[in-house]
Amino acid sequence: MNEVDYIIPRNLEEVFRAVEKKKRKIKFIAGCTNVIPYMREEAISPELLIDLSSLENLDYIREENGIIAIGALTTISKLTASEIIRNQSPIIFSAASLLGNPLTRNRATIGGNLADASPAADMVPPLLALEAFVHTKRSEGEGREIFLDKFFLGPNKTVLAEDEIITHITFSKPKDSARGIYIKLGLRNSMAISVVSIALMIEMEGKVCQKARVALGAVSPTPIRVYRLEKNLEGKEIDQKSIQECSVILKEEISPISDIRASAEYRKLATSVLFKRAIQKVLNGEKT
Amino acid sequence: MMKRKMVNFKVNGELHEVLVESNALLVNVLREELGLTGTKYSCGTGQCGSCTVLVDGKPALSCLMLAVAADGADIVTIEGMAKPDGSLEPVQEAFLDHSAIQCGFCTPGMVIMGRDLLNKNSNPSESEIQEHIKGTLCRCTGYTSIVRAIKSCGK
């Protein structure tokens, strides 16, 4: 690993003072589960690591007035251990249980997963399906409240400014009648970078789908909501015809690449299969 | 000139003060500065689990931690898993009883994860054990004896 300097500020003032003063290539870190591999393969070469792990009040999972808030420093393990997450947002629980492995989950943070912005990031499709917001603070001016679907610009690229950190993520608690699922397709059953992943949430009234939210990972430069698909599901019964139409829409809405894990062709096929599987499972009341 | 920092942490109950480079990995500091070679360095990318240690009570991959980030931490390595009088902890005994060790490289990580699971779930099922050791790879045993060993510690 190249030379690098390291500081661990105790509060936000120290963070922003370090950003302004040092004028070097900085990288905010927390769990480091991706940052260290990147640095060792020289994919990134920061000059100063600013460790956010000591910052207070960024590690929590709360529900208040129907809004669930998760602090950016919350580890993935804490998400899987949380009653709020397991009961109120089971698709977040699923994704957290499938991310990495039990060891990386003890260190990796939800803020880090978003800031790293891999197109295959596991926490993102469920948060997209839940229409989450990202909250930030920066040294210059006010922090922002960014709709997650507007947060990603491309592979490992977000709208975050150089001096901007994620403080927390919020989303509305889904209705009790909402059902959802997160399915991840990987090349092994642990420590797998998703080949295709899908988060699906639907609200049914009888046989009619009132609301549908569909998000995909690893099949586009960023994780995406598939609005056309959602519109094709809403306001009618979900039957073989609408599922078939959705498969066609999916192929048109995604832009997978061929890489060492899978070909674009395979991803296109797999997305369709995963979608059908997800819909079937959700309609059958299955959660995984 | 590489920046060096003084870090203080507790390892297996003893306080240590070590001068480390900012980019030094915890696994290398434990092995080379402190001579605790029970923790292994294998893949270096956090995929095999052979570098597992406990950090503030939680298993973590020491190859994915900077030593400077461990300042103030309470670390336990495999050397610290045995009881103070030197006798083995139950998971270690079970590994011996069930021949769950061949080359021994994955064993420290497996023992730490086995104990971590039993602390949370006093009688884990086979699939719960398999789930918990998902991040710890073994090339020798095929895992069955390891799972059996951990299962035998359940009550």
Image: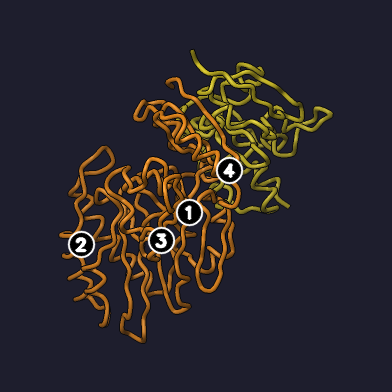
Chain colours: A orange, B yellow
Residue at the farthest bottom position: A206
Q: Earlier in the sequence, mark 2 or mark 1?
A: 1
Left or right of B52, for residue A173: left
| Cα distance in 3D space between marks 2 and 3 | 25 Å
Task: Check disc 4 and give the amino acid type.
Answer: Asn
Say if mark 2 contacts mark 3, CB within 8 Å. no
Drawn side of residue A268 relative to residue A185, left or right: left
Q: Amino acid at mark 2?
A: Leu
Mark closer to the observer (4, 1) = 4
Which of the marked residues, 4 or 3, is nearer the chain's N terminus? 4
- SS label for mark 1: helix
Instruction: Compute the Cα span from label 3 to label 1.
Output: 18 Å
| Residue type at tag 1 | Ala
Q: Which amino acid type is marked by label 3?
A: Phe
A274 or B73, which lies in front?
A: B73
Residues at marks 3 and 1, common chain? yes
Q: CA distance from mark 4 to mark 3?
A: 23 Å
Write down the residue under mark 3: A133
Say whether mark 2 and mark 4 are on the same chain. Answer: yes
* Residue at mark 3: chain: A
- The mark found on residue A11 in the picture is 4
Residue sitting nearer the eye, B130 or B65: B65
Looking at the image, residue A83 sits to the left or right of residue A283; the answer is right
Where does label 1 land, which residue?
A96
Image spot of residue A41 (x, y percent): 37, 26
Q: Does dot 3 land on a helix, a strand or a loop?
A: strand
**What crowding class fits label 3: few (fewer than 14 Cα within 10 Å), some (14-19), or many (20 or more)?**
many
Q: How many marks?
A: 4
Residue at 36%, 85% in the rendered image:
A205
Measure the alpha-carbon separation of dots 2 and 1. 25 Å
| Quarter of the figure with residue B153 | top right
